[in-house]
Amino acid sequence: MIATSIKELFKSASLQQEVQINGWVRTFRSNRFIALNDGSTLRTIQCVLDFENTDESLLRQITTGAALKITGTLVESQGKGQDVEIQIKDIEVHGTADPETYPIQPKKHSMEFLREQAHLRVRTNTFGAVMRVRSALAFAIHDYFRKNDFFYFHAPIITGSDAEGAGEMFRVTTLSDKQPPLDEHGAVDYKEDFFGKETNLTVSGQLEAEAYAMGLGKVYTFGPTFRAENSNTSRHLAEFWMIEPEMAFYDLDANMDLAEDFIKSVLKYILENCEEDLAFLEKRLLDEEKTRPQAERSEMALIEKLRFVVDNHFKRVTYTEAIDILRNSKPNKKKRFEYLIEEWGADLQSEHERFLVEKHFKCPVILFDYPAKIKAFYMRLNEDGKTVRAMDILFPGIGEIVGGSQREERLDVLKEKIDELDIDEKELWWYLDLRKFGTAVHSGFGLGFERLVQFATGMGNIRDVIPFPRTPQNAEF
């Protein structure tokens, strides 16, 4: 007999049919009722055992966490809480789990404890639901770009360039850490290293994606990126996944249109395909928020928040307009903002972004035309000489979720910006070549995948939406 998943069993199996399933024991009550889950769905199926005719040694092996194969007949349930159950004919124990040492017992565990058990936490309802939603979002992303004639581009993981100019990069080297070769000035001689130069793990695939957009038209990356940022917050990871589309012949308006349509599309997909998991995560969030002061609770429930984004047109506002709104706002005048807005040129914080979305406009917001001084070198300079064609998309409860821009396609302007920032032209010779040979208007944006999963699942900490989080002082698994 071929085993079926519990999800398929609930969907299509007929009563009195003989079935076979595999899974892990969630609970075993009264030596009779086994709740089995296989990860395919949030739900467990109750399997009823005739314990009086079951060997005692087998009963002792049926504990929370044990892996079983169960064969039996699907029947209408006699108890409450489920429509069907399995009357067991045969049990095979794949693997036991010692109840004295198995850490994921059927009780409430803290998020901190579960992070210490990252290899087992996916067996809980919360993490099973989060990871199924994460998987669905990843599928929806690839599906969206495929349907819109984008080519999937694999950006290099090891790179010699710092796309963001932030310098917070992980070095890749084969040199000895105790006695590296030195040059005539006493500095590490990277000519002796594996690649013959200083290399790092990528912080973004954008620059390389630009190169391929200028030959294939529309490309996107979806891969891991790395930031050596010593930041212990609920919003930062050292290793995370990025979605970065780049489009030739797209200006900033077309870029904003694409970003809005993309986000709405992938969130709509999970609303239609992850109803069970989203309902569970919404209830979990509501229960969690009951313990918080009223002022700290979300104004919208999880599914309402997702529909809020899918159903509302994103308001487009210039940075200059946003600064005026924030400067004249009550929280700013009454000094309730942690970072007060006093003058044009300020770098907006999450509290400002959330005010614009949740209090002022009451819809998702796209801010554009930012001051050049607070944005990256590759963004197209506007005619005013002080702003660039940058855009950020702001969401309720999270602030910025997307950052993008029209890229600077003019060779002379790009060279000036590189010189101003003291970036070595030799390191970006190939990037400058793109402006020498067939340059054209082009644009793109970046979306941190974990930020999207965090928004979609309502999880309060970004470490809980990636299987094995990498953070300062933590690479345990």
Image (cartoon, grey):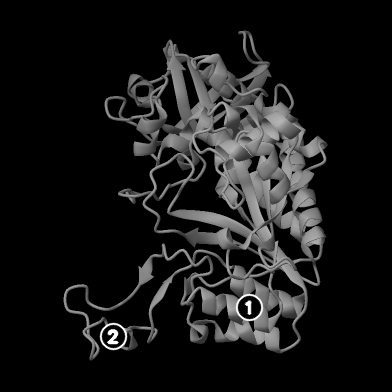
> To which residue does mark 1 refer?
414
Q: Nearer the viewer, residue 145 or 124?
A: 145
Residue at 48% across / 30% down in the picture? 124
Amino acid type, label 1: Leu
CA gap between label 2 and label 1 equals 30 Å
Q: Which mark is residue 111?
A: none
Indicate the position of residue 293 as horizontal and vertical percent values.
Answer: 51, 15
Count residues near mark 2 (Cα–Cα under 10 Å), then give few for <14, some for 14-19, many for 20+.
some
Placement of 79 over or under 86, stated as above or below: above
Q: Can see residue 276? A: no
Image point 62% across, 40% down: which residue? 353
**Residue shown at 67% from the left, 83% from the top:** 411
Q: Secondary structure at mark 2?
A: loop
Q: Residues within 10 Å of mark 1 (few under 14, many from 20)?
A: many
- Pick whichever, 317 or 454, lies toward us: 317
Q: Which residue is mark 2?
A: 189
Q: Nearer the viewer's eye, disc 2 or disc 1?
A: 1
